[in-house]
Image (spheres, helix red, strand yellow):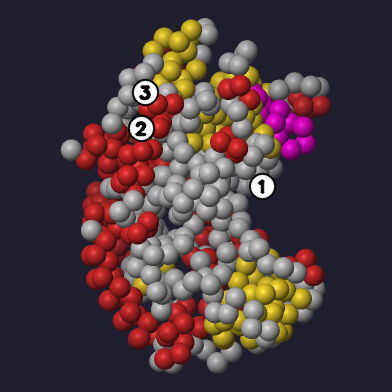
Protein backbone atom coordinates (compact mmCIF):
# COMPACT_ATOMS: atom_id res chain seq x y z
CA UNK A 1 0.00 0.00 0.00
CA UNK A 2 1.38 3.43 -0.90
CA UNK A 3 1.52 6.22 1.61
CA UNK A 4 -1.12 8.17 -0.31
CA UNK A 5 -3.57 5.28 -0.47
CA UNK A 6 -2.96 4.51 3.21
CA UNK A 7 -3.73 8.11 4.08
CA UNK A 8 -6.94 8.04 2.04
CA UNK A 9 -8.10 5.00 4.07
CA UNK A 10 -7.16 6.58 7.37
CA UNK A 11 -4.12 4.42 7.95
CA UNK A 12 -0.66 5.50 9.02
CA UNK A 13 2.30 3.72 7.47
CA UNK A 14 4.48 2.35 10.26
CA UNK A 15 8.24 1.88 10.29
CA UNK A 16 10.67 1.19 13.06
CA UNK A 17 12.69 4.26 12.05
CA UNK A 18 11.71 7.39 10.14
CA UNK A 19 14.54 9.56 8.81
CA UNK A 20 13.71 13.13 7.78
CA UNK A 21 15.80 14.43 4.88
CA UNK A 22 18.05 12.87 2.24
CA UNK A 23 21.21 14.93 2.29
CA UNK A 24 24.51 13.74 3.75
CA UNK A 25 22.81 13.13 7.12
CA UNK A 26 19.77 11.20 5.95
CA UNK A 27 21.56 9.13 3.34
CA UNK A 28 24.46 8.39 5.67
CA UNK A 29 22.03 7.24 8.37
CA UNK A 30 20.16 5.03 5.92
CA UNK A 31 23.34 3.48 4.55
CA UNK A 32 24.65 2.63 8.00
CA UNK A 33 21.29 1.20 9.08
CA UNK A 34 21.31 -1.19 6.14
CA UNK A 35 24.92 -2.06 6.87
CA UNK A 36 23.84 -2.98 10.43
CA UNK A 37 21.11 -5.24 9.05
CA UNK A 38 18.21 -2.86 9.79
CA UNK A 39 15.81 -2.47 6.85
CA UNK A 40 12.62 -1.24 8.49
CA UNK A 41 13.17 2.45 7.87
CA UNK A 42 12.00 5.18 5.51
CA UNK A 43 13.49 8.52 4.43
CA UNK A 44 10.97 11.33 4.03
CA UNK A 45 12.17 13.92 1.51
CA UNK A 46 10.22 17.06 0.63
CA UNK A 47 11.99 17.55 -2.71
CA UNK A 48 11.63 15.56 -5.93
CA UNK A 49 15.01 13.89 -5.49
CA UNK A 50 17.73 13.14 -2.96
CA UNK A 51 20.67 15.40 -2.17
CA UNK A 52 19.45 17.84 0.47
CA UNK A 53 21.09 21.24 0.36
CA UNK A 54 23.18 20.14 -2.63
CA UNK A 55 20.01 19.61 -4.60
CA UNK A 56 18.06 22.73 -3.64
CA UNK A 57 20.99 25.16 -3.84
CA UNK A 58 21.91 25.44 -7.51
CA UNK A 59 22.73 29.10 -8.00
CA UNK A 60 25.56 29.98 -10.40
CA UNK A 61 28.96 29.38 -8.84
CA UNK A 62 27.60 27.14 -6.07
CA UNK A 63 30.44 25.00 -4.72
CA UNK A 64 31.82 23.60 -1.50
CA UNK A 65 34.42 25.48 0.54
CA UNK A 66 35.82 22.28 2.08
CA UNK A 67 38.13 20.18 -0.15
CA UNK A 68 36.13 17.47 -1.93
CA UNK A 69 38.26 14.54 -0.80
CA UNK A 70 37.33 15.36 2.80
CA UNK A 71 33.79 16.61 2.17
CA UNK A 72 32.53 13.10 1.37
CA UNK A 73 31.73 9.89 3.22
CA UNK A 74 34.74 8.13 4.72
CA UNK A 75 33.36 4.80 3.48
CA UNK A 76 32.71 5.96 -0.09
CA UNK A 77 35.78 7.59 -1.57
CA UNK A 78 35.47 9.30 -4.93
CA UNK A 79 38.81 9.27 -6.77
CA UNK A 80 37.25 11.16 -9.67
CA UNK A 81 36.59 14.58 -8.13
CA UNK A 82 37.23 17.09 -10.89
CA UNK A 83 38.56 19.83 -8.60
CA UNK A 84 39.94 20.34 -5.13
CA UNK A 85 36.64 22.08 -4.29
CA UNK A 86 33.78 20.36 -6.10
CA UNK A 87 30.95 22.33 -7.71
CA UNK A 88 27.36 21.74 -6.62
CA UNK A 89 26.40 19.54 -9.56
CA UNK A 90 29.22 17.13 -8.74
CA UNK A 91 28.35 16.86 -5.05
CA UNK A 92 24.70 16.26 -5.91
CA UNK A 93 25.74 13.53 -8.37
CA UNK A 94 27.93 11.97 -5.67
CA UNK A 95 25.02 11.79 -3.22
CA UNK A 96 22.73 10.35 -5.89
CA UNK A 97 25.42 7.75 -6.62
CA UNK A 98 25.59 6.82 -2.93
CA UNK A 99 21.80 6.42 -2.77
CA UNK A 100 21.88 4.06 -5.76
CA UNK A 101 24.97 2.09 -4.79
CA UNK A 102 23.77 1.35 -1.26
CA UNK A 103 20.18 0.69 -2.38
CA UNK A 104 18.63 3.49 -0.35
CA UNK A 105 16.22 4.71 -3.03
CA UNK A 106 13.56 2.04 -2.28
CA UNK A 107 13.39 3.49 1.24
CA UNK A 108 12.89 7.10 0.07
CA UNK A 109 9.49 8.83 -0.10
CA UNK A 110 9.94 11.86 -2.36
CA UNK A 111 7.71 14.95 -2.44
CA UNK A 112 6.82 14.18 1.18
CA UNK A 113 6.94 17.24 3.41
CA UNK A 114 6.85 16.65 7.16
CA UNK A 115 4.52 19.21 8.69
CA UNK A 116 4.47 18.01 12.30
CA UNK A 117 5.56 15.21 14.61
CA UNK A 118 4.00 14.24 17.94
CA UNK A 119 5.11 11.74 20.57
CA UNK A 120 2.30 9.34 21.47
CA UNK A 121 2.96 8.50 25.11
CA UNK A 122 0.33 5.77 25.28
CA UNK A 123 1.68 3.86 22.28
CA UNK A 124 5.33 4.79 22.75
CA UNK A 125 5.89 6.00 19.19
CA UNK A 126 6.09 9.08 17.02
CA UNK A 127 3.17 10.17 14.83
CA UNK A 128 4.38 12.04 11.77
CA UNK A 129 1.96 14.17 9.77
CA UNK A 130 2.95 15.12 6.21
CA UNK A 131 1.48 17.46 3.61
CA UNK A 132 -1.53 16.03 1.79
CA UNK A 133 -2.72 14.11 4.82
CA UNK A 134 -0.05 11.41 4.62
CA UNK A 135 0.67 9.87 8.03
CA UNK A 136 3.53 7.77 9.36
CA UNK A 137 4.27 6.28 12.74
CA UNK A 138 7.70 5.26 13.98
CA UNK A 139 9.36 3.94 17.11
CA UNK A 140 12.29 6.23 16.45
CA UNK A 141 12.86 9.41 14.42
CA UNK A 142 16.19 10.67 13.11
CA UNK A 143 16.15 14.26 11.87
CA UNK A 144 18.54 14.88 9.00
CA UNK A 145 17.19 18.36 8.33
CA UNK A 146 20.18 20.59 7.80
CA UNK A 147 20.65 23.91 9.56
CA UNK A 148 21.04 25.61 6.18
CA UNK A 149 17.63 24.67 4.82
CA UNK A 150 15.29 27.53 5.82
CA UNK A 151 16.10 30.73 3.86
CA UNK A 152 16.42 33.96 5.82
CA UNK A 153 14.99 37.17 4.38
CA UNK A 154 15.74 40.73 5.49
CA UNK A 155 13.12 42.74 7.31
CA UNK A 156 12.82 45.51 4.73
CA UNK A 157 9.79 47.73 4.25
CA UNK A 158 8.08 47.50 0.86
CA UNK A 159 9.37 44.18 -0.44
CA UNK A 160 5.81 43.24 -1.32
CA UNK A 161 5.57 46.37 -3.47
CA UNK A 162 8.49 45.49 -5.74
CA UNK A 163 7.33 44.88 -9.34
CA UNK A 164 10.54 43.39 -10.72
CA UNK A 165 12.00 39.91 -10.30
CA UNK A 166 12.86 38.87 -6.76
CA UNK A 167 14.28 35.60 -5.40
CA UNK A 168 16.55 34.08 -2.73
CA UNK A 169 19.77 32.38 -3.81
CA UNK A 170 18.30 29.03 -2.72
CA UNK A 171 15.41 29.49 -5.18
CA UNK A 172 17.50 30.73 -8.06
CA UNK A 173 15.39 31.37 -11.16
CA UNK A 174 17.52 30.19 -14.07
CA UNK A 175 14.78 31.19 -16.52
CA UNK A 176 15.27 34.87 -15.68
CA UNK A 177 17.88 36.46 -17.93
CA UNK A 178 20.04 38.94 -16.01
CA UNK A 179 21.62 40.27 -19.19
CA UNK A 180 21.37 44.03 -19.32
CA UNK A 181 19.39 44.25 -16.09
CA UNK A 182 19.90 46.48 -13.06
CA UNK A 183 20.36 43.98 -10.26
CA UNK A 184 20.29 44.62 -6.51
CA UNK A 185 21.98 41.95 -4.40
CA UNK A 186 21.15 42.15 -0.71
CA UNK A 187 23.58 40.34 1.57
CA UNK A 188 27.22 39.29 1.47
CA UNK A 189 27.12 35.76 2.87
CA UNK A 190 28.78 32.63 1.56
CA UNK A 191 26.27 32.19 -1.27
CA UNK A 192 26.54 35.80 -2.42
CA UNK A 193 30.33 35.56 -2.58
CA UNK A 194 29.88 32.74 -5.10
CA UNK A 195 27.10 34.13 -7.30
CA UNK A 196 28.02 37.85 -7.35
CA UNK A 197 30.82 37.37 -9.95
CA UNK A 198 28.28 35.69 -12.27
CA UNK A 199 25.74 38.48 -11.78
CA UNK A 200 28.36 41.17 -12.38
CA UNK A 201 29.31 39.65 -15.72
CA UNK A 202 25.67 39.50 -16.87
CA UNK A 203 24.09 42.63 -15.46
CA UNK A 204 24.25 46.14 -16.85
CA UNK A 205 24.48 47.40 -13.25
CA UNK A 206 25.13 45.55 -10.00
CA UNK A 207 24.34 47.19 -6.67
CA UNK A 208 25.58 45.10 -3.74
CA UNK A 209 24.00 46.08 -0.43
CA UNK A 210 26.49 45.25 2.30
CA UNK A 211 25.68 45.49 5.99
CA UNK A 212 28.89 43.83 7.19
CA UNK A 213 31.94 43.07 5.09
CA UNK A 214 33.07 39.43 5.22
CA UNK A 215 36.68 38.35 5.58
CA UNK A 216 37.71 36.61 2.37
CA UNK A 217 40.75 34.49 1.67
CA UNK A 218 42.18 33.30 -1.63
CA UNK A 219 40.65 29.94 -2.58
CA UNK A 220 43.32 27.27 -3.21
CA UNK A 221 41.19 25.59 -5.87
CA UNK A 222 42.55 23.78 -8.90
CA UNK A 223 41.62 20.92 -11.21
CA UNK A 224 42.61 17.47 -10.00
CA UNK A 225 45.19 16.08 -12.43
CA UNK A 226 44.80 12.94 -14.52
CA UNK A 227 47.69 11.41 -12.59
CA UNK A 228 46.08 12.11 -9.19
CA UNK A 229 42.75 10.62 -10.25
CA UNK A 230 44.38 7.46 -11.55
CA UNK A 231 46.65 7.03 -8.53
CA UNK A 232 43.67 7.45 -6.18
CA UNK A 233 41.64 4.95 -8.22
CA UNK A 234 44.38 2.30 -8.29
CA UNK A 235 45.69 2.90 -4.78
CA UNK A 236 42.86 3.80 -2.34
CA UNK A 237 45.39 4.10 0.48
CA UNK A 238 46.93 7.06 -1.35
CA UNK A 239 43.59 8.84 -1.40
CA UNK A 240 43.04 8.08 2.28
CA UNK A 241 46.43 9.59 3.07
CA UNK A 242 45.54 12.66 0.98
CA UNK A 243 42.24 12.96 2.85
CA UNK A 244 43.95 12.59 6.21
CA UNK A 245 46.42 15.31 5.32
CA UNK A 246 43.58 17.71 4.50
CA UNK A 247 41.77 16.79 7.72
CA UNK A 248 44.70 17.50 10.01
CA UNK A 249 45.60 20.71 8.18
CA UNK A 250 42.05 22.02 8.73
CA UNK A 251 41.87 20.64 12.27
CA UNK A 252 44.88 22.72 13.26
CA UNK A 253 42.76 25.86 12.76
CA UNK A 254 41.14 25.17 16.13
CA UNK A 255 44.30 26.54 17.73
CA UNK A 256 43.38 30.02 16.47
CA UNK A 257 39.58 29.79 16.54
CA UNK A 258 39.22 28.37 20.04
CA UNK A 259 42.46 28.09 22.00
CA UNK A 260 44.27 31.35 21.20
CA UNK A 261 42.31 33.80 18.99
CA UNK A 262 45.36 36.09 18.83
CA UNK A 263 46.75 33.63 16.29
CA UNK A 264 44.09 34.91 13.88
CA UNK A 265 46.46 37.80 13.21
CA UNK A 266 48.27 35.51 10.77
CA UNK A 267 45.07 34.90 8.82
CA UNK A 268 44.25 38.62 8.91
CA UNK A 269 47.60 39.44 7.33
CA UNK A 270 46.87 37.07 4.43
CA UNK A 271 43.32 38.39 4.02
CA UNK A 272 44.52 42.01 3.93
CA UNK A 273 47.11 41.06 1.34
CA UNK A 274 44.32 39.48 -0.72
CA UNK A 275 42.33 42.74 -0.63
CA UNK A 276 45.33 44.87 -1.62
CA UNK A 277 46.22 42.52 -4.45
CA UNK A 278 42.75 42.48 -6.01
CA UNK A 279 41.41 45.98 -5.31
CA UNK A 280 43.35 49.16 -6.16
CA UNK A 281 40.66 51.76 -5.34
CA UNK A 282 41.24 52.92 -1.73
CA UNK A 283 37.55 53.78 -1.21
CA UNK A 284 36.42 50.30 -2.22
CA UNK A 285 39.21 48.74 -0.19
CA UNK A 286 37.91 50.50 2.89
CA UNK A 287 34.35 49.34 2.21
CA UNK A 288 35.28 45.68 1.92
CA UNK A 289 37.69 45.63 4.88
CA UNK A 290 35.91 44.25 7.97
CA UNK A 291 36.22 45.97 11.36
CA UNK A 292 36.03 42.81 13.48
CA UNK A 293 38.41 39.95 14.25
CA UNK A 294 38.80 37.56 11.37
CA UNK A 295 37.00 34.30 12.11
CA UNK A 296 34.23 35.94 14.17
CA UNK A 297 31.96 35.42 11.18
CA UNK A 298 32.45 32.63 8.67
CA UNK A 299 35.67 33.09 6.68
CA UNK A 300 34.92 32.89 2.97
CA UNK A 301 37.10 31.98 0.02
CA UNK A 302 37.09 33.48 -3.47
CA UNK A 303 39.44 34.80 -6.12
CA UNK A 304 36.59 36.24 -8.21
CA UNK A 305 34.54 38.27 -5.73
CA UNK A 306 36.78 41.30 -5.25
CA UNK A 307 37.49 41.71 -9.00
CA UNK A 308 33.72 41.63 -9.62
CA UNK A 309 33.19 44.44 -7.08
CA UNK A 310 35.98 46.45 -8.67
CA UNK A 311 34.36 46.26 -12.13
CA UNK A 312 32.96 49.51 -13.65
CA UNK A 313 29.35 48.25 -13.55
CA UNK A 314 29.44 47.32 -9.84
CA UNK A 315 28.82 49.41 -6.76
CA UNK A 316 29.10 48.40 -3.11
CA UNK A 317 26.47 50.25 -1.08
CA UNK A 318 27.06 50.32 2.67
CA UNK A 319 24.28 52.79 3.51
CA UNK A 320 21.36 50.94 5.10
CA UNK A 321 18.18 50.21 3.16
CA UNK A 322 15.19 52.36 4.10
CA UNK A 323 12.60 50.74 1.85
CA UNK A 324 11.91 49.00 -1.44
CA UNK A 325 9.61 50.62 -3.97
CA UNK A 326 8.02 49.31 -7.17
CA UNK A 327 11.19 49.63 -9.25
CA UNK A 328 13.92 50.68 -6.86
CA UNK A 329 15.73 50.32 -3.57
CA UNK A 330 15.89 53.44 -1.37
CA UNK A 331 18.72 53.83 1.13
CA UNK A 332 18.44 55.70 4.44
CA UNK A 333 20.20 58.73 2.94
CA UNK A 334 17.23 59.15 0.58
CA UNK A 335 19.02 57.99 -2.58
CA UNK A 336 16.84 55.92 -4.91
CA UNK A 337 18.62 53.12 -6.76
CA UNK A 338 16.72 51.74 -9.78
CA UNK A 339 16.42 47.95 -9.88
CA UNK A 340 14.94 45.41 -12.25
CA UNK A 341 15.70 42.47 -9.98
CA UNK A 342 16.50 41.81 -6.32
CA UNK A 343 18.49 38.73 -5.29
CA UNK A 344 18.78 37.82 -1.62
CA UNK A 345 22.11 36.46 -0.47
CA UNK A 346 21.00 36.63 3.13
CA UNK A 347 21.66 33.05 4.16
CA UNK A 348 19.59 30.77 6.36
CA UNK A 349 17.94 30.51 9.77
CA UNK A 350 20.64 28.28 11.23
CA UNK A 351 20.07 29.48 14.80
CA UNK A 352 16.32 28.73 14.60
CA UNK A 353 16.10 25.39 12.78
CA UNK A 354 12.74 24.26 14.20
CA UNK A 355 9.81 26.72 14.28
CA UNK A 356 7.04 26.40 16.90
CA UNK A 357 4.18 24.05 16.10
CA UNK A 358 6.22 21.33 14.40
CA UNK A 359 7.65 18.86 16.96
CA UNK A 360 5.72 17.95 20.11
CA UNK A 361 7.32 15.71 22.73
CA UNK A 362 6.30 14.28 26.07
CA UNK A 363 3.25 16.03 27.63
CA UNK A 364 2.76 17.94 24.36
CA UNK A 365 5.91 19.99 24.88
CA UNK A 366 6.58 22.14 21.78
CA UNK A 367 10.26 21.99 20.77
CA UNK A 368 10.02 25.24 18.82
CA UNK A 369 8.75 27.06 21.91
CA UNK A 370 11.38 25.35 24.05
CA UNK A 371 14.05 26.55 21.65
CA UNK A 372 12.81 30.14 21.30
CA UNK A 373 15.84 31.40 23.21
CA UNK A 374 18.12 29.16 21.19
CA UNK A 375 18.29 25.43 20.46
CA UNK A 376 19.98 23.19 22.98
CA UNK A 377 20.66 19.45 22.95
CA UNK A 378 22.84 16.79 24.51
CA UNK A 379 25.86 16.15 22.31
CA UNK A 380 23.89 18.03 19.65
CA UNK A 381 21.80 14.90 19.22
CA UNK A 382 19.09 14.34 21.85
CA UNK A 383 16.73 16.61 23.81
CA UNK A 384 15.15 16.05 27.21
CA UNK A 385 11.40 15.54 26.91
CA UNK A 386 11.64 14.12 23.38
CA UNK A 387 12.11 10.34 23.59
CA UNK A 388 13.53 8.35 20.68
CA UNK A 389 14.26 11.52 18.70
CA UNK A 390 17.77 12.08 17.36
CA UNK A 391 19.14 15.12 15.55
CA UNK A 392 22.01 14.98 13.08
CA UNK A 393 23.74 18.37 12.70
CA UNK A 394 21.92 19.52 15.84
CA UNK A 395 22.80 22.44 18.13
CA UNK A 396 26.51 23.19 18.59
CA UNK A 397 27.70 20.62 16.06
CA UNK A 398 28.49 23.13 13.31
CA UNK A 399 32.05 23.87 12.31
CA UNK A 400 34.04 26.91 11.35
CA UNK A 401 37.13 24.99 10.39
CA UNK A 402 36.58 21.44 9.11
CA UNK A 403 34.19 19.06 7.31
CA UNK A 404 30.63 18.65 8.58
CA UNK A 405 30.56 15.16 7.09
CA UNK A 406 33.00 14.07 9.80
CA UNK A 407 30.61 15.36 12.47
CA UNK A 408 27.63 13.73 10.78
CA UNK A 409 29.35 10.34 10.69
CA UNK A 410 30.20 10.71 14.39
CA UNK A 411 26.55 11.32 15.25
CA UNK A 412 25.38 8.45 13.04
CA UNK A 413 27.65 6.11 15.01
CA UNK A 414 26.12 7.42 18.26
CA UNK A 415 22.56 6.83 17.01
CA UNK A 416 23.48 3.30 15.90
CA UNK A 417 24.83 2.55 19.38
CA UNK A 418 21.56 3.81 20.87
CA UNK A 419 19.61 1.56 18.51
CA UNK A 420 21.70 -1.45 19.53
CA UNK A 421 20.87 -0.79 23.18
CA UNK A 422 17.17 -0.36 22.40
CA UNK A 423 17.11 -3.68 20.57
CA UNK A 424 19.24 -5.53 23.10
CA UNK A 425 17.22 -4.45 26.14
CA UNK A 426 13.92 -4.26 24.22
CA UNK A 427 13.44 -0.70 25.37
CA UNK A 428 10.32 1.30 24.74
CA UNK A 429 12.20 4.59 24.75
CA UNK A 430 15.45 6.37 25.52
CA UNK A 431 15.38 9.99 26.66
CA UNK A 432 18.30 12.09 27.75
CA UNK A 433 18.18 13.19 31.38
CA UNK A 434 17.50 16.92 31.77
CA UNK A 435 20.38 17.33 34.23
CA UNK A 436 22.82 15.65 31.86
CA UNK A 437 21.69 17.94 29.04
CA UNK A 438 21.96 21.06 31.20
CA UNK A 439 25.42 20.11 32.48
CA UNK A 440 26.65 19.42 28.97
CA UNK A 441 25.47 22.81 27.71
CA UNK A 442 26.95 24.72 30.64
CA UNK A 443 30.29 23.27 29.62
CA UNK A 444 29.67 24.04 25.94
CA UNK A 445 28.86 27.69 26.64
CA UNK A 446 31.82 27.96 28.99
CA UNK A 447 34.17 26.74 26.29
CA UNK A 448 32.66 28.82 23.51
CA UNK A 449 32.81 32.07 25.51
CA UNK A 450 36.48 32.76 24.81
CA UNK A 451 36.47 31.75 21.15
CA UNK A 452 36.87 34.14 18.26
CA UNK A 453 33.20 33.52 17.35
CA UNK A 454 31.97 35.01 20.63
CA UNK A 455 34.71 37.50 21.43
CA UNK A 456 35.56 38.74 17.93
CA UNK A 457 33.39 41.88 17.93
CA UNK A 458 30.80 40.92 15.33
CA UNK A 459 27.19 39.81 14.98
CA UNK A 460 26.86 36.51 13.12
CA UNK A 461 24.35 33.78 12.44
CA UNK A 462 26.33 31.65 14.90
CA UNK A 463 24.78 33.64 17.77
CA UNK A 464 21.11 33.37 18.68
CA UNK A 465 19.44 36.81 18.62
CA UNK A 466 17.34 36.15 21.75
CA UNK A 467 19.81 34.59 24.16
CA UNK A 468 23.10 35.81 22.73
CA UNK A 469 24.39 32.25 22.98
CA UNK A 470 26.46 30.54 20.34
CA UNK A 471 24.07 27.68 19.56
CA UNK A 472 25.66 26.69 16.28
CA UNK A 473 29.34 25.77 16.57
CA UNK A 474 31.30 23.03 18.27
CA UNK A 475 34.00 24.69 20.43
CA UNK A 476 36.82 22.23 19.98
CA UNK A 477 38.56 19.67 17.83
CA UNK A 478 36.32 17.39 15.79
CA UNK A 479 38.16 14.33 17.11
CA UNK A 480 36.97 15.36 20.58
CA UNK A 481 33.39 15.23 19.38
CA UNK A 482 33.97 11.84 17.83
CA UNK A 483 35.39 10.59 21.11
CA UNK A 484 32.29 11.55 23.13
CA UNK A 485 29.94 10.05 20.53
CA UNK A 486 31.84 6.79 20.07
CA UNK A 487 29.65 4.98 22.60
CA UNK A 488 26.09 5.52 23.72
CA UNK A 489 26.38 6.60 27.34
CA UNK A 490 23.19 5.03 28.69
CA UNK A 491 23.91 6.50 32.14
CA UNK A 492 22.95 9.93 30.85
CA UNK A 493 19.53 8.66 29.75
CA UNK A 494 16.22 7.55 31.16
CA UNK A 495 15.64 4.11 29.68
CA UNK A 496 12.05 2.92 29.63
CA UNK A 497 10.77 -0.60 29.15
CA UNK A 498 7.03 -1.27 29.16
CA UNK A 499 6.43 2.05 30.89
CA UNK A 500 9.02 1.46 33.64
CA UNK A 501 12.21 3.44 34.00
CA UNK A 502 15.06 0.93 34.13
CA UNK A 503 18.09 3.21 34.28
CA UNK A 504 18.73 6.89 34.82
CA UNK A 505 20.84 9.68 36.29
CA UNK A 506 24.47 8.94 35.74
CA UNK A 507 25.68 12.42 34.90
CA UNK A 508 29.02 12.84 33.20
CA UNK A 509 31.32 15.79 32.48
CA UNK A 510 31.71 15.06 28.81
CA UNK A 511 33.75 17.90 27.42
CA UNK A 512 36.24 17.72 30.26
CA UNK A 513 36.43 13.97 29.64
CA UNK A 514 37.96 14.54 26.20
CA UNK A 515 39.99 17.58 27.16
CA UNK A 516 41.96 15.80 29.85
Q: Residue at x 64, y 79 (%)?
A: 332
Disc number lying in front (3 or 2): 2
Disc number lying in front (3 or 1): 3
In the image, is residue 351 part of the stretch drawn in magenta?
no
From the top left corner, tell me how far across and down residue 480 is, in percent: 27, 41
From the top left corner, tell me how far across and down residue 385 is, in percent: 52, 25
- Residue 432: name its quadrant: top left
Q: Is residue 315 left or right of residue 237?
A: right
Is 118 situated above or below 70? above
Residue stretch rendered in magenta on the structure: 126-137
* Identity of the residue furthest to the left in this view: 516
- Residue 331: name its quadrant: bottom right
- Which residue is denoted by mark 1 in the rendering? 48
- Which residue is denoted by mark 2 in the rendering? 439
Which of 506/100 is in front? 506
Q: Is residue 488 left or right of residue 462?
A: left
Q: Residue at x 34, y 51 (%)?
A: 449
User: Label 3's element?
Assistant: helix
- Which residue is denoted by mark 3 in the rendering? 492
**Residue 99 visible in the displayed image:** no
From the top left corner, tell me how far across and down residue 420 is, in percent: 40, 20
User: If you read the primary sequence from the N terminus, does the residue marked by circle 3 or circle 2 appear first?
Assistant: 2
Question: What is the C-alpha distance between the residues marked 1 and 2?
Answer: 41 Å
Amino acid sequence: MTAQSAASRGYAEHHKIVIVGSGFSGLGMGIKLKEAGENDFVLLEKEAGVGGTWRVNHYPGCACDVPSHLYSFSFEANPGWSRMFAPQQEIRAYLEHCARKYNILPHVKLNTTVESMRWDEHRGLWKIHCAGGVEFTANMVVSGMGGLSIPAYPNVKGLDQFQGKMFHSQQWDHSYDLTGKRVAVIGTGASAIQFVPYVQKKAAKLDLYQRTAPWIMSKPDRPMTWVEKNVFKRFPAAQRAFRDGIYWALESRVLAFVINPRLMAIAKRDAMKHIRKQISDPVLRKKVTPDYTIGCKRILMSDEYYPALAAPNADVITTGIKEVRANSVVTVDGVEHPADAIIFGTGFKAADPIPPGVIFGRDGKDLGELWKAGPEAYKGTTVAGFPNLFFLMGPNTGLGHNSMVYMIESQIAYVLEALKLIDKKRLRSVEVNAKAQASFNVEIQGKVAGTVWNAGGCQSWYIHPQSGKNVTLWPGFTWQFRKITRRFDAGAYNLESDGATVATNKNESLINEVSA
